[in-house]
Image (cartoon, rainbow, N blue to C red):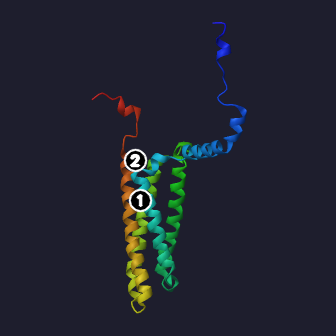
Amino acid sequence: MADFPSKVTTETSSPNSQSSQQGGNSLRGLAANVTTMLDMSFIRSIPAILMITEIFLGLLHWALIASAPYTLLPAYGFVMFVAVTLWILTTILFFMILSGAKHKLSFVPWPLTMMAYHATAAVLYLAAFLANAASVQHFIDFPYYYGLLAAAAFFGALVTVAYAASAFFSYLDWKGDGGNAATDTVPT
């Protein structure tokens, strides 16, 4: 038993080998820190896929509107406002959730907040889509702009459906039991 301390060493590597691996370890450590800061399970969820779809289609929608002379009709000003504002807000919300804001800001009722946001966005996008679709006919004499605005109306409809689907899944998340201990302990 007396020779036990002499046989055990607490060093995991020699000082020379540690300095040669420093660059590789720091990059691996940085990558590990980034992945632990991100909520990777959120990326694989249906709400995340819908939010990515909303971001992509929303960007396409407002790019098509911006490519046409949208200032000629007041309705397109509203469409552009809704498209750009919701695209920015959805992008910010996506990265907030991805970075773990749900855990850091636990005082926010996230299921209710997400449901309210997506329902409001769906209603606003529905109004913007209807304004877009109703105003396309004014550009029928200009085939290039007519095609752009018709495509924008199509993508506006797709974004509306994506926001409505997100509102539906947010509603299901909000109405779910959410791990409430009171509902788990009630005898049936």
Q: Residues within 10 Å of mark 1 (few under 14, many from 20)?
A: many
What residue is pinned by disc 1?
Answer: 119
Quote the CA–CA distance across marks 1 and 2: 13 Å
User: In the image, is residue 100 above or below residue 64?
Assistant: above
User: In the image, is residue 173 above or below residue 4?
Assistant: below
Give 23 or 92, whichever is nearer the viewer: 23
Residue 131 is at least partly visible in this image = no
What residue is pinned by disc 2?
Answer: 174
Residue 95 image position (x, y, % from top left): 54, 54
Residue 122 image position (x, y, % from top left): 41, 63
Helix, strand, or loop for circle 1?
helix
Q: Residues within 10 Å of mark 2 (few under 14, many from 20)?
A: some
The amino acid type found where label 2 is placed reads Trp
Q: As drawn, which residue projects farthest toward the left?
A: 188
**Sooner in the amino-acid sequence: mark 1 or mark 2:** 1
Question: Which image quarter holds the C terminus?
Answer: top left
